[in-house]
Image: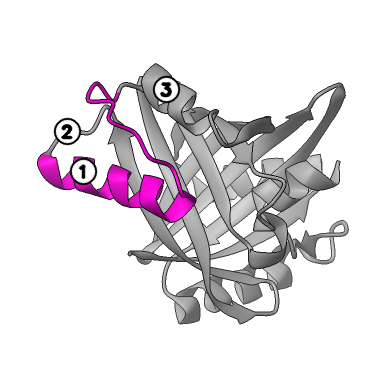
Amino acid sequence: MPIETEKKIIVSDNVFNIYLKDLGTTKKIKCVDTYFYNQSLDFKKNSESLRIRDVVTEGISKITYKYLSSSKPNLFIREEKEICLPPQTQKDIDVLFDIFAILGIETNVKTLYRSEVEEILKINYEIIGTVEKNGYRFWKDNIKISLYVTTFRKKAKVKTINIIEIEGIEGLIEKEYKKFVETYGNMESIRLSDKNNFQLLLSI
């Protein structure tokens, strides 16, 4: 599985807006992640997550399963299986059924559009909530920087925070984070998140 390496920084409105302005040209993005959960499996402890992402700005949907690869303080290093829905190739279909196998799901369904996949997941998993991300994406020195106004919804509970995600090679992530702290750290409080978005959703 591909490896995702990422830092998450929670910041104030002021830091978010100034950093966005300083980055310059960015790509606007909106997505809504629907997270699934099984009470008998401790996704939170194992840093796992299972979601269907609807990328509103691109008109596509994806299923994503992530699993902890290695552990470092405030750095998320996870293996990832992700494909578009419906799958576009036989290889993508194989990946989807690999995800089903990992999750203990058996199905003979052949039409694998977003709605069908959601119904398959709901046989053994419940929808725990959604995470809506409105923001911007920027590429810099081979790392991806995303700035999101992030709204967590779990039943009647709603919480919105600003999250900056720095993703790429570990050394480049640390370099960018150090520069970020040196530039913006004395403006207002910023803090690294020790939880992924699924864990943050559960915690609200």
Label 3: few (<14), some (14–19) or many (≥20) C-alpha neighbours in 10 Å: few
Of residues 116 and 2, the one drawn nearer to the viewer in this rendering: 116
Of residues 48 and 123, the one drawn nearer to the viewer in this rendering: 123
Tag in front: 3 or 1: 1
Asked if residue 108 is among those painted magenta in the image, a careful observer would answer: yes
Q: Amino acid at mark 3?
A: Thr
Tag in front: 3 or 2: 2
Residue at the extreme left of the image, as rendered: 90
Q: Which residue is mark 2?
A: 88
Left or right: where 158 falls relative to 118? right
**Contact between labelled residues 1 and 3, with CB atoms less than 8 Å apart:** no
On-image quarter of the N terminus: bottom left
Q: Amino acid at mark 1?
A: Asp
Query: What residue is rendered at 70% in x and 79% in y?
Result: 73
Query: What residue is rendered at 75% in x and 42% in y?
Result: 201
Of residues 78 and 145, the one drawn nearer to the viewer in this rendering: 78
Residue 172 x %, y % = 46, 76
**Would you identify the image quadrant in which residue 131 lies?**
top right
Residue 56 x %, y % = 45, 21
Left or right: where 200 falls relative to 7? right
In this view, 170 is above or below 65? below
Q: Which residue is mark 1?
A: 92
Asked if residue 39 is among those painted magenta in the image, a careful observer would answer: no
Query: What residue is rendered at 29% in x and 45% in y?
Result: 97
Cα distance in 3D space between marks 3 and 1 = 22 Å
Q: Which residue is mark 3?
A: 57
Give the extent of the magenta segment. Answer: 90-112
**Contact between labelled residues 2 and 3, with CB atoms less than 8 Å apart:** no
Q: Amino acid at mark 2?
A: Gln
Of residues 179 and 55, the one drawn nearer to the viewer in this rendering: 55
Q: Secondary structure at mark 2?
A: loop
**Contact between labelled residues 2 and 1, with CB atoms less than 8 Å apart:** yes
